[in-house]
């Protein structure tokens, strides 16, 4: 019973990290938390690979309990002056703070999202495009609106955690459609049309919850919010692996932003509220992983974790399953084929 309670508690916290459930009690993000992050930011960013605990529960738990004082903070240098960045979901939640951090570093930012969330202020100085990653035709429409200047950095930040089974207009389970397939269509369109710089970075948000999954496929049904979401995050890791294989001139990077208190609407009390107050990081802290991946010299195919830093995955880690990653890639290519033009100008190997 104790083991199941611990598992439930950990999974619940992780679900809160990436879901669209919002919480009003912003006071749980304390000055003490901010001060701890400021102290940690004063140290040089360590890019040495590290292997996290092998046990899944211990790895997830240690990443949570340590994060408030140990989340890595992106250095102010190097800057991104003149670099063109396209980010999905860049006007709300963690994505808004990623966008602001990019602008502070001189980047030219275009965001792609379904629209601005209620209560979100407009971020000045950006170009906003509208697209729903679950509706592939809208992704094509948004890409059609881009000018011909190549994108230097693509950040696949958007994600959903569905509370119940829903399907996209193409008949896909919606978590998979948004978190995996929609982003696959986006970067493949950019590659095909020559809209990515030759040395572009592709940054995809995953999460350590992937450790609780073994498969990711278009054919897997919705069974629970956490398990369905975890499978999509495993799929995101496999996407980075496959991108590194098929397009070695690009730098694909997976990131775990941390367990974030995202948004704030609807007070939550009891144990869950106490845990959020003690363990979750704010959205600005959650933005640091994407900013690090956008600015620092991380290796191609890297997995950056907000607490562990550059993660050295064990050979038996589910994220290292090359066979299943290849199967997923072929499924995704089949799904998006009707939306790609016949003239493929990408340089796939």
Image (cartoon, rainbow, N blue to C red):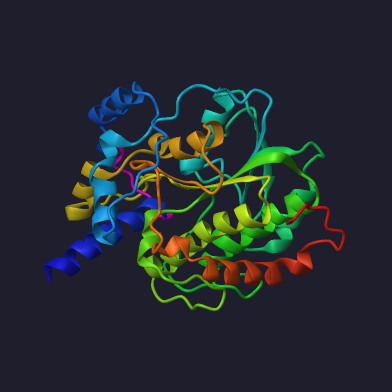
- Which residue is more in the foreground, 158 or 83? 83
Give percent across and percent down for residue 198. Answer: 73, 40
- Which residue is more in the foreground, 102 or 256? 256
The N terminus lies in which quarter of the figure? bottom left
Vertical placement of residue 3 versus 198, above or below: below
> In the image, 195: left or right of 212?
right
Residue 270 shows in the view = yes
Which residue: 39% across, 62% down?
317
Vertical placement of residue 293 versus 163, above or below: above
Vertical placement of residue 294 versus 258, above or below: above
> In the image, 231: left or right of 323?
left
Q: How many marks?
A: 0
- Which residue is more in the foreground, 242 or 316? 316
The C terminus lies in which quarter of the figure? bottom right
Q: Is residue 259 magenta?
A: no
- In this view, the residue farthest toward the left is 2
Q: Quadrant of residue 225?
A: bottom left
The majority secondary structure of the magenta stretch comes to loop
Give percent across and percent down for residue 82. Answer: 69, 25
Vertical placement of residue 78 versus 27, above or below: above
Give percent across and percent down for residue 139. Answer: 70, 56
Q: Is residue 20 magenta?
A: yes
Q: Which residues are magenta?
A: 19-26
Q: Quadrant of residue 28?
A: top left
Which residue: 68% across, 70% down?
335
Which residue: 74% across, 50% down?
190
Residue 88 shows in the view = no
Q: Quadrant of residue 251?
A: top right
Which residue: 68% across, 59% down?
185
Give percent across and percent down for residue 325. Answer: 55, 66
- In this view, the residue farthest toward the front is 315
> In the image, 320: left or right of 193?
left
């Amino acid at each position: 019973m104790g083991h199941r309670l611990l598992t439930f508690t950990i999974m619940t916290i992780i679900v809160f990290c990436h879901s669209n459930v919002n919480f009003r009690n912003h006071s749980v993000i304390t000055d003490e938390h901010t001060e701890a992050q400021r102290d940690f930011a004063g140290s040089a960013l360590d890019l040495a690979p590290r292997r996290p605990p092998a046990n899944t529960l211990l790895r997830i738990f240690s990443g949570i309990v340590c994060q408030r004082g140990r989340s890595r903070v992106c250095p102010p240098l190097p800057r991104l002056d003149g670099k063109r960045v396209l980010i999905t979901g860049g006007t709300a939640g963690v994505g808004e703070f990623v966008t602001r951090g990019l602008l502070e570093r001189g980047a030219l930012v275009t965001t792609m999202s379904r629209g601005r969330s209620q209560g979100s202020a407009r971020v000045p100085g950006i170009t906003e495009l509208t697209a729903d990653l679950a509706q592939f035709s809208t992704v094509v429409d948004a890409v059609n609106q881009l000018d011909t200047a190549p994108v230097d950095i693509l950040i696949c930040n958007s994600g959903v955690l569905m509370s119940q089974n829903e399907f996209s207009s193409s008949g896909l389970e919606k978590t998979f459609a948004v978190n995996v397939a929609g982003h696959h269509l986006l970067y493949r369109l950019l590659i095909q049309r020559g809209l990515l710089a030759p040395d572009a970075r592709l940054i995809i948000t995953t999460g350590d919850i992937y450790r609780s999954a073994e498969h990711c496929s278009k054919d897997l049904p919705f069974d629970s919010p956490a398990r369905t979401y975890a499978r999509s995050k495993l799929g995101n890791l496999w996407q980075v692996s496959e991108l590194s294989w098929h397009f070695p001139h690009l730098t694909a990077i997976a990131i775990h932003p941390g367990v974030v208190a995202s948004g704030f609407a609807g007070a939550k009390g009891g144990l869950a509220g106490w845990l959020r107050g003690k363990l979750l990081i704010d959205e600005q802290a959650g933005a640091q992983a994407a900013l690090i991946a956008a600015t620092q010299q991380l290796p191609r195919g890297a997995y950056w974790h907000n607490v562990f830093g550059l993660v050295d995955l064990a050979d038996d880690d589910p994220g290292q399953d090359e066979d299943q990653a290849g199967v997923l890639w072929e499924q995704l290519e089949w799904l998006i084929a009707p939306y790609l033009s016949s003239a493929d100008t990408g340089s796939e190997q």
